[in-house]
Image (cartoon, rainbow, N blue to C red):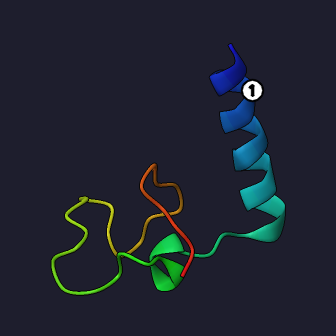
Amino acid sequence: MLKFIRDILFKIKDAFVGHKFLCDSCMYDYGNACVRPERPNAIRCPDYKKR
């Protein structure tokens, strides 16, 4: 249930603020370090770590 509420709040935030792509500021954004299919336009990622 908590995940459901979090997802709804995330969608509301995107509707008003917009979103930026995490890959632009992720420490795994080089070469083949990240193999996720969402790359390079991920807005949510469990592996994200800020540079």
Viewed as shown, does residue 31 lie left or right of 51?
left
On screen, residue 32 above or below 48 = below
The residue depicted at 57 percent of the width and 74 percent of the height is 50
Tell which of 19 and 51 is nearer to you: 51
Percent x, y of residue 24? 49, 84
The image shows residue 34 at horizontal and vertical percentages of 25, 68
Query: 21 left or right of 35?
Result: right
Q: Hey, what amino acid is under mark 1? A: Ile
Q: Quadrant of residue 5?
A: top right
**Residue at left 80%, top 55%?**
13
Check the image and report above or below for 47 versus 5: below
Q: Counting other residues with Cα less than 10 Å from the Cα at mark 1, is it few (<14), some (14-19), or many (20 or more)?
A: few
Secondary structure of the residue carrying tag 1 is helix
Which residue is the site of mark 1? 5
Point 19% across, 64% down: residue:
35
In the displayed structure, does residue 35 sit left or right of residue 27?
left
**Could you say where residue 11 lies in the image, as x and y percent from the top left?**
70, 47
Looking at the image, residue 3 sits to the left or right of residue 12; the answer is left
Question: At x 66% / y 36%, what residue is drawn?
Answer: 7
- Percent position of residue 23, x then y: 44, 76
| Quadrant where the C terminus is found in the figure | bottom right
Task: Work out whether residue 7 or residue 31 is closer to the camera in this orientation and state it.
Answer: 31
Give the mark count.
1
Residue 27 in which image quadrant: bottom left
